[in-house]
Image (spheres, grey):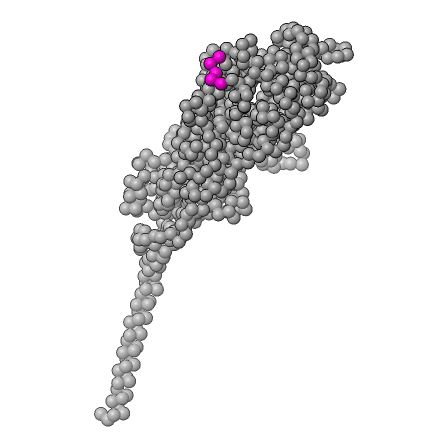
Amino acid sequence: MDHKDARHFRLHILAILFFAVMAVYLGVLFNTQVNNYDYYYASSIRTIARSEPVEAARGNITDRNGKVLVSSRSSYNLTFDASLLDEDEDANEAILRLLELCRERGINWVDALPITRSAPFSYGLDSLNDTDKKRFLTYLKDLDGAAEALGAYLLEHPALLETTDEDGDIENPADDILADADLTDSQKASRLLDELTASQLTADLLEGAGLSPTRLIALMREDLDVPASFSVAEARLVLGIQYEIRSRNLVSTDAYVLAEDIDTELISLLNDGDYAGAKITPSSVREYETTYAAHILGYLGDITAEDDYQNTLKPLGYAMNDKIGRSGVEAAFEEYLRGTDGVRVVSSNEEGKITGEYYSVEPVPGNTVELTIDLDLQQATEDALAAAITRMNENDPVESRGGAAVVLDVDTREVLAMASYPTYDLSTFRQSSIYAALNADPNRPFTNRATQGRYTPGSTIKPLTAVAALEEGVISPTERIRTPSFWAYPNDPTGSGTRCAGGDHGRLNVTEAITKSCNYFFAEMGYRLGMDTFLEYLHAFGLGEHTSIEIGDAAGTLPDNPEGRDYAPWAAFGQANQAYTPLQIANYIATLVSGGEFCQPHLLKAVKTYDNTEVVTVGETEPERQIDISDSTLEAVKKGMLGYTQPGGSVYNAFRSCVVTAGAKTGTSQLGGDQTENGVFVCFAPYDDPEIAVAIVIEHATWGSNVAPTGVEILNAYFAADEGGNAVTGENQLLP
């Protein structure tokens, strides 16, 4: 073989080898991409690192002395993530396996579908909060079969849509709908269903419409594609989760928090078992270090459709599964308490098990919110209020009683204590049975009476009337007027007037009139002042107007004159059509004894970073305005209130045990009819240099004097602590 032939031979050999290698490569490629595509694709997906958000711990809430009231504890949630399922895996099957595991372990899961989880099925609408009940009604209105049944039933029973307005008048939107001749019966039924509200939705209405729990389960199975192979009991369990996902407007690829704060044993079982779609995510839960101050602290809740998540919360970085403040301090200081979520990168092996993780962005915990309240004083105030109302209920079980008490710092207007009774326990109230009982309680334990309750002030308004009369010059501090038992409106042919419960008090000056609580004297002052001038002083002291309290409050009602009538004489001794919150009343007293410095009451002491290294902001303590109150006016009014607590005063017996000299005033809030009157009480102390102002209201207490012992208990709690070296403090320094 010559050289040329040998060269050609080598080239042929190389070509054969090249094509052989290419054939092997193409065979492997074909086997990978075609024959075993599904296997390798799944493996590649599972081994790709994914990023996921990491919830930041919510900030702590403390009292003014740094005592932790609410904190966050690290925990783990069980989430269901449909995006983790293979194409051949059924979401309903996966959900059922997870629920059965939770049930075996005694772990509760999130499910607000108001149908019992086991047969015999029944409705549990009373266990739903307002938000969840609205969600359920919205779902029913969109559910084929259920919407038709409800509309048809309302067409036959339009009276179910009746409502009562504030004046007690009955209204019914069905009247106009039924009277519209242009509408067909089906259109009328649809319109009537649109008018149905969550408060009108009851189990009886659903049953009457032919929507028994079993029937509704059947309709929901069809709507949510739960297989026929599932038993009714199994279907109910799965439907609860599918309903949650649907009603919360989550897309199918979003992770849904199935169970919160799961234990380590469940985590191990999930990691070792075949639970498709299950994912363990780090989280945190609120820990309540006290059973007090529930109305102040508030609580967290789920994000709902009413929050306008897409336009409002999502741009701020919230996830749909996040909790947000729903009431109290939790809601008021959401922007400070909420931390900044982090991001972690997680890698998994081909079996879906996590093989590694790291934080690409560390989560930043929320700030610490330091409140103005003193926990010890808060406890003493709540206990004193509860004990007083309990005693009254035992002696007179006919009336339904509640009450409120507020303690303010006179100089700063910081809220040192704020109590409302009845109350509830933040750590347990979400339990369905407890919530149902609380929600059905006619005494409204969820209502913060200190900020939302509106009460006629009774005679506690008389010191304000005295200030107005003295400052306007309609009477002098030393002038005495004759005070017979009946004050008659001058030149009124109808003989209108008011009778003084104390009878004929003789000749009184303004100080004595306060101590004697003489209605005749103050009716005369109201007549001399006139309603317009009296209203100016009510405005100046912040009555009948919203305060700036961070957790929100009711405005109350100022008195006015019906056409052709003058109610100023009655308004001047605390009656007529006026009503104020206990917080407003306490602030009026604090403003008076401070010499007219009007400040807004507030709960925020300071906001500090989570590590207590920096003060973010502090509460506002500067006066908004100065009310002109002369020294002589202030002395005359304060002496009148002092006389109330001294020998001969109506509450002297209660104040004999008081550890500090104080001024006070009682009030009886007339309710009319056969109702027992409300008792109102205000006080301040020490007399010479006031530090705190207190306002208390107890519903149906008969007399304001019956409330005075509760006021003494609160004063003693504050000033006894002062003597013992544990006084309420007001420090703004950083914690060590």
Q: Is residue 640 left or right of residue 714?
A: right
Q: Quadrant of residue 339?
A: top left
Of 315 and 202, nearer the camera is: 315
Q: Is residue 463 left or right of residue 141?
A: right
Q: Residue at x 54, y 43 (%)?
A: 308
Eyeballing the image, is 317 above or below 520?
below
Of 338 and 721, nearer the camera is: 721
Magenta residue check for 413: no
Of 624 and 222, nearer the camera is: 624
Query: Residue 420 location in percent, x, y?
Result: 49, 24
Eyeballing the image, is 578 above or below 342?
above
Query: Residue 327 location in percent, x, y?
Result: 50, 34
| Outermost bottom residue | 2
Q: Quarter holding the N terminus? A: bottom left
Label the magenta part by its dominant secondary structure: loop
Q: Quadrant of residue 162?
A: top right
Residue 581 in sight: no
Q: Residue at x 48, y 32 (%)?
A: 730
Magenta residue check for 658: yes
Query: Residue 349 location in percent, x, y?
Result: 31, 55
Residue 109 in sight: yes
Of 410 and 455, nearer the camera is: 410
Query: Residue 64 location in percent, x, y?
Result: 46, 32
Q: Which residues are magenta?
A: 656-660
Q: Residue at x 31, y 36 (%)?
A: 105
Eyeballing the image, is 645 above or below 101?
above
